[in-house]
Amino acid sequence: MNLSEEQMKKLMKNASKKTGVDVNKMKNAAESGKLDDFIGQNLSSDASQKLKSVLTDKNAAEKLLSSPEAKELLKNLLKG
């Protein structure tokens, strides 16, 4: 699934609103190589561990993103 720039901005805005995590700060942390620090400071230890597990396993990430639940979540976040 390829998202347009406008869809990506809307997705990030809605994800930030619904999770309470500033997605722009997360993106900046990832780009600067400080994603681990950001995750540790902004997510529970359980959520942090699960996210790191998915991020380090390409097959797990692809499986997660292709799940019906992930597709529905993206659809809902894009609706706003």
Image (cartoon, rainbow, N blue to C red):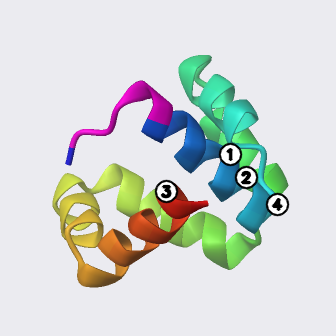
Task: Residue type at mark 4: give it.
Answer: Gly
Mark 2: secondary structure: helix
Q: CA distance from mark 1 to mark 4?
A: 10 Å
| Residue placed furthest toward the top | 32
Q: Which residues are magenta?
A: 2-6
Which tag, 1 or 4, sits closer to the chain's start? 1
Q: Nearer the viewer, mark 2 or mark 3?
A: 3
Which tag, 1 or 3, sits closer to the chain's start? 1
Q: Residues within 10 Å of mark 2 (few under 14, many from 20)?
A: some
Mark 3: secondary structure: helix
Query: What is the quadrant of residue 4 in the picture?
Result: top left
Circles 1 and 4 in contact, beta carbons < 8 Å:
no
Residue that numbered label 4 is attached to: 20
Query: What is the quadrant of residue 42 in the picture?
Result: bottom right
Q: Position of residue 62 (x, y in %)?
A: 20, 60
Q: Residue at x 78, y 44 (%)?
A: 22
Residue that numbered label 3 is attached to: 78
Q: Using the image, tell me which numbered label, if any, was put on residue 37.
A: none
Q: Using the image, tell me which numbered label, if any, was put on residue 13.
A: 1
Circles 2 and 1 in contact, beta carbons < 8 Å:
yes
Task: Residue type at mark 1: give it.
Answer: Lys
| Relative to 54, residue 39 above or below | above
Main SS class of the magenta portion in the image: loop
Residue that numbered label 2 is attached to: 16
